[in-house]
Amino acid sequence: MTDKKLAPRFIVLIGMVVIAATIRIMPHWPNFAPFGAMALFGAAHFKKPIIGLLVTLGALFIGDIILNNTVYAAFDPQFQWAVYLAFISIFILGFYLLKKVTVSNVILGAVAASVLFFLISNFGTWQMGIMGYPKNFAGLMMAYGAGLEPYLYTLASDLFYSILLFGSFALMKQRFPSLAIAK
């Protein structure tokens, strides 16, 4: 039987995702949480994409359990399909866009992540009838119109937390070269 240790890189990546998930459940401005950044970060840095997806989805799910049983005790969980579809879409975007992590790719990814979340979550709000929008094109446009102000917070948070997560990890790799993927 071999004694396999968890690699320092893997431990640090999980720790950073857990910190991001914890920030998400702490009090914050509306829509200003590391949701998209966490998906992008996991997609870009875990050696095996499926592990990155499972770790980040698991952190999102645990955070949702805490949020839905404390802060949003009356929250309707039927809407969650839109949130998870958005998260998985952002992860897939990050997997393809961030094969090479550069400042411009991270910024582009953060902007695209916020757009994806805006489109999918507001469609979900309209489709589920959560806000009473008419089930027609005008109702869909009303849902998107109402989501514009929260979108600005989402955009700001995706940019802020993406820069924070990716920048922090880049600095850690400079300080601790063992965190880099062996070539």
Image (cartoon, helix red, strand yellow):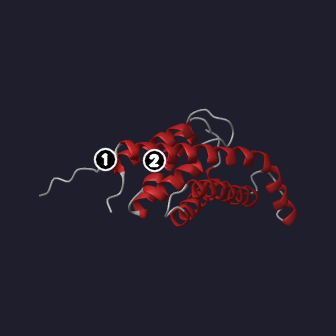
In this orientation, which residue lies closer to the viewer: 23 or 58? 23
Residue 156 location (% of width, % of height):
68, 44
Q: Answer left or right for 18 relative to 73.
A: left
Residue 180 location (% of width, % of height):
36, 53
Regarding mark 2 in the picture, which secondary structure is present there?
helix
Residue 82 appears in which quarter of the rendering?
bottom right
Q: Up-down: is 34 above or below 136? A: above
The residue lying at 34 percent from left, 48 percent from top is: 177
Residue 90 appears in which quarter of the rendering?
bottom right
Residue 86 location (% of width, % of height):
61, 59
Dot in front, 1 or 2: 2
Q: Amino acid at mark 1?
A: Pro
Q: Residue furthest left?
A: 1
Estimate the spatial distance between the alpha carbons at disc 1 and disc 2, rounded to whole Å: 15 Å
Regarding mark 1 in the picture, which secondary structure is present there?
helix
Neighbor class of circle 2 (other Cα within 10 Å; few <14, some 14-19, many 20+) is some
In this orientation, which residue lies closer to the viewer: 161 or 175? 175
The residue lying at 54 percent from left, 64 percent from top is: 92
Q: Which mark is residue 8?
A: 1
Residue 45 location (% of width, % of height):
44, 56
In this orientation, which residue lies closer to the viewer: 10 or 33? 10
Which residue corresponds to mark 2? 170
Q: Going from the N terminus, do you reach mark 1 or mark 2 first?
A: 1
Q: Answer left or right for 12 relative to 20.
A: left
Q: Amino acid at mark 2?
A: Ala
